[in-house]
Amino acid sequence: MITRTSRRVLPAAVSAATAVALLAGCTSGGGSSSATTAASGSAPAAAAPTATPTPTPTPTPTVKPTGANDPALQAFYGQQLAWAACPPTPGDGKADTSALQCATLKVPLDYTAPATGTLDVAVVRNPASKTDQRIGSLVLNPGGPGGSGVAMVKGASTRFDGPLHDRFDLVGFDPRGVAGTSPLKCLDDQARDGWLTTDTPGADHGKQLADACQAKYAQVLPFVSTRNSARDMDVLRAALGDQKLSYLGMSYGTYLGSLYAEEFPDRVGRLVLDGATSASMSLAQHNIEQSAGFERALKAFAADCATKNPCSLGKDPDQAAQKLADFLDGLKDKPLKTSSGRVLTSTAAWNGVLGRLYGGEKAWSNLRNSIGWAMVRGKGDDLLDLADDYNGRDKSGRYDDSADAYTAIHCADGATDAPAGDQLQAALTDLAAKAPLVGKHDPMAALFDPDCRVWPFRSTEKPHAIKSAAATPIVVVGSTGDPATPYAWAEKLAGELGNAVLLTREGEGHVAYDRSACIRTAVNSYLVDGAVPAAGTRCQTD
């Protein structure tokens, strides 16, 4: 768990001039922990804004804020971060965090009305190890939506050692609604257990979450969009003292980076987008293509399993995936017991299996064993553990806030438009054709993940191809066997951006930087020295 910073909001009646004066003194760092969090895991009472106006149902502004040139935003852009030692948090584990520094960035709740309220953004940095050769800051995002940039930097004790950490301050921030920045936790842990693992979700499944989120966070939900987080990232860039942004974003972080390039083309430095997704498709189409990616990865894993001994999926590589899917679907009628007293439902088992496919071939041995314990021995503990890991549930039964942030950010990003009637039937037919195994368990859940159809707020954000006018080419990285962000998306994004180069990793698993020395060398050279990879560069997995 990352320390949650309190949300400080200016009264609605505060004038712009008063807001500027108040912000001049808002440079405290480190944030504050939520001492009032209930044992059940419900959000503390202080988590809701206390003095913001009622938001409009269309939070995306029609008039684009002008960033640092906007007089109403100058106080935000001119603030100084007060860096201090990071307070210890349970999520730190045994990691050495002594070199890390934490601060709080003040940003407007609503960029079109910056005097009406503010949010506190949690920020952390790991200073460059070679201070005499320091280039500037490298902002990192791990994906999601719902992933914590603060946790990414805190957990990366050696991950970026070498050229990146030598020359850059490694900086992470928590986007809106995530971890230390106005965290969203709509359901308590007991309710979350049932909500995530049920095989009979019911017609009001999505509404249950939507209503709970609206009851707690109605004032902030319209403003947790990725576009607003991209604007926060530009305020952060200025507060860090960098003229241009250097950025490494993974998975969903590629969307955050793409929107930044669209919103602030003149401030783009060197951007790397690894595990790319495109903003030009609807959520339903996105989910169909992603399901197809997992279908391919599931078949690759099962076929490999059939060549190993032991393998509970049989010896026929062509039938192994079907045998696994039949077993997982059969858990709807015969869920497995576990030693904890909980049961392994079909939904939980599918989550555990698909979640493990993110890890690529190095995770296959563990997955093979977990499936064997369930299929042969009738023990669901291992697969349930994998599902818990995927869902953000720890051993004590507490969930992190990533699941609700995932839904709220997607819905604020414009995922509220959904196919209906003939379009819905066509989408379901497409899903069945492209992912007959993965999509069969619950086609509607696969198509509407998350379910924004009943979300209380409507966004004006629409799917569109993002163009880049950056002076420096953006590096887009794709992996040919990526189940979560299929390689075709990296090709698509690189083409849509225009001023971009595609770097390819051959192999299974999600994102490339940690899976290939060749990719790391190319990315590091680009970020540190500006050496753009040659078009068509392909790397092997380690």
Image: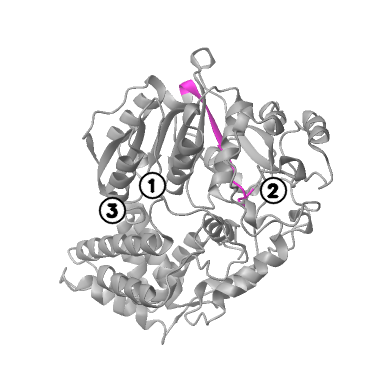
Sequence-earlier tag: 1 or 3: 3
Instruction: Residue type at mark 3: give it.
Output: Glu
Instruction: Residue type at mark 1: give it.
Output: Ala
Which quadrant would the C terminus be assigned to in this image?
A: top left
When the figure is inspected, residue 243 is found, relative to residue 354, above or below; the finding is above
Q: CA distance from mark 1 to mark 3?
A: 33 Å
Q: Are marks 3 and 2 in contact (CB under 8 Å)?
A: no
Can I make out residue 526 in this image?
A: yes
Instruction: Residue type at mark 2: give it.
Output: Arg
Q: Which residues are magenta?
A: 166-179
Local packing at callout 2 (Cα closer than 10 Å; few below 14, some 14-19, many 20+) is many
Quickly name the residue at label 1: 465
In this rendering, the label closer to the viewer, 1 or 3: 1
The image quarter in which residue 16 lies = top right
Quickly name the residue at label 2: 4
Measured as percent of width and height from the top left, residue 440 is found at: 34, 77
